[in-house]
Amino acid sequence: DMIVSTKDILTFPELCSSDKCSGGDKCSDPACELCLPCLSKDDIQNFKQAWLEQANRHATRRIFPVPPQSQNFGNISSNNALSKGPNGIKLSARNAKMARWFQGKCNIDVNWCN
């Protein structure tokens, strides 16, 4: 079994280390919800599972969430494209969070973009 470190699931390092998201009660800001202090135990477990699935996918392709674009979206809280699924269907809050997480991983490593 492969062990996933907490550092493996972190995304948006510049944002999460900025004054906007570090210190105090910043978790109420949607832009900061993927920063480590704002992640629930369930979030951490889900992201670690997604990381393992990505690492073990071999020649398969992910179909959900929709593969992110290999570009940096900067302000993740205002990106409406990441709150929609296939055919423009509105994602649940949990699925939208996962889509933003995948975008954050894509911003760090292009291998996460497909």
Image: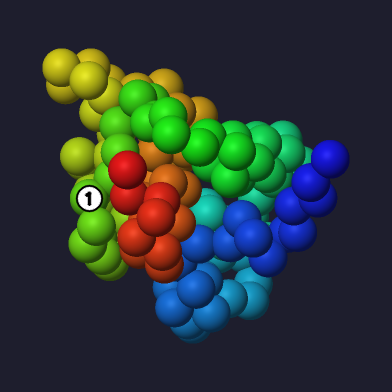
* Residue where numbered disc 1 is placed: 69
Q: Is residue 65 above or below residue 28?
A: above
Q: Is residue 52 above or below residue 4?
A: above
- Looking at the image, how many numbered discs can be counted on the residues? 1
Say few, some or many: other residues with alpha carbon within 10 Å of mark 1 (under 14 / 14 to 19 / 20 or more).
Answer: some
Camera sees residue 85: yes
Q: Position of residue 67 (x, y in %)?
A: 30, 38
Q: Residue at x 39, y 55 (%)?
A: 111
Q: Position of residue 112 (x, y in %)?
A: 41, 51
Q: Residue at x 73, y 59 (%)?
A: 6
Q: Residue at x 16, y 21 (%)?
A: 88
Q: Residue at x 38, y 31 (%)?
A: 61
Q: Nearer the viewer, residue 30 or 65?
A: 65
The quarter in which the N terminus is drawn is: top right
Q: How is the image coloured?
A: rainbow
Q: Position of residue 101 (x, y in %)?
A: 46, 48
Q: Is residue 58 above or below residue 38?
A: above
- Helix, strand or loop status at disc 1: loop
The kind of residue on which mark 1 rests is: Gln
Residue 40 in which image quadrant: top right
The quarter in which the C terminus is drawn is: top left
Q: Residue furthest left?
A: 87
